[in-house]
Every structure is written in structure tokens, then in C-alpha cells.
Amino acid sequence: MAIETWPRETCEYLSVVVEGDSNLDSLPVQMTVLAYGIRPTDADWETAEWDVDDDGATVAKIKMGPGTPFDFSVTPGPKVPWVKVTASEEVPVLEGEPIRVT
């Protein structure tokens, strides 16, 4: 699978598929997008939204690009989206597929 490319000038939603046993959209979800090889810290997370993609899969999404906390116009390169779902007994952190900001 080829790595997805994002022009640094674009501002749009970045989505990550999230699978779960329960109704995910009732759970708080956060995301971050970091340089490849960097792991998230508590300060990196931003509130994300739930949605459904064209294939019917549940996705977490966050806006990325100029004017957002994830503006990589000055620091293009490989990035990795991360998702954190807060459930009552578990807080899974998921690493999404890398993207390349050009």
C-alpha cells in the first residue's frame, strides 16, 4: 500500500478507522498527528470527532492543515496520526497509517 500524500497547503479532515465492540460514538475520542518516530505525550492530544467513512467503518477524525494545531506547512515530511479512546475500564491508543506531508 502506498503512503498517502497531503500537500502542506491543504486543510481537511484526517481519518483513522477504529474498530470496537461497543457503540464507539458515545466514547470520548482524541487525536494527535506527530512526526514519524515520535510517540504521543499527554500534551499532544486534541479533541477529535467520530464519523463513518464511505465503506461504513467508524472513524476518528481531526482537521489537519494551516490554521489548526496540526499545521505542518513549515515542517513537511512523514507524519503519523494517533487515536486515543477513553472507555470506562480501558484507554486504548491506536497508531494510524503514516502519511507524507509535501
Image: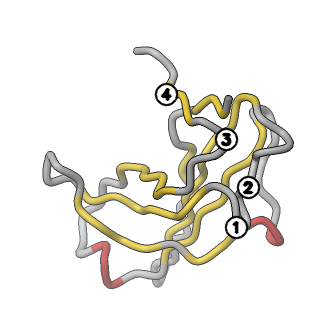
Label 1 SS: loop
Cα distance in 3D space between marks 3 and 1: 12 Å
* Circle 4 residues within 10 Å: few <14, some 14–19, many ≥20: few
Cα distance in 3D space between marks 3 and 4: 13 Å
**Where in the figure is residue 101, as x and y percent of width and height?**
66, 34
**Where in the figure is residue 55, as x and y percent of width and height?**
14, 46
Q: Seen in the image, is 45 located left or right of residue 75? A: left
Comes first in the chain, label 2 or label 3: 3
| 2 and 1 marks in contact (CB < 8 Å) | yes
Comes first in the chain, label 3 or label 1: 3
Task: Indicate the amino acid at tag 2.
Answer: Asp
| Residue at 52%, 77% in the rendered image | 86
* Circle 3 residues within 10 Å: few <14, some 14–19, many ≥20: some
Q: Residue 19, located in which quarter of the rendered image? A: bottom left
* Circle 1 residues within 10 Å: few <14, some 14–19, many ≥20: few
Disc assigned to residue 8: 3
| 2 and 4 marks in contact (CB < 8 Å) | no
- Check disc 1 and report the residue beneath it: 67
Cα distance in 3D space between marks 2 and 1: 7 Å
- Name above or below for residue 46 compared with residue 53: below
- Name above or below for residue 42 compared with residue 98: below
Residue in the foreground of this view, choosing between 42 and 12: 12
Q: Which numbered mark, 3 or 4, is in the foreground of this view?
A: 3
Label 4 SS: strand
- Check disc 2 and report the residue beneath it: 71
- Check disc 4 and report the residue beneath it: 4
Label 2 SS: loop
| Residue at 78%, 65% in the rendered image | 44
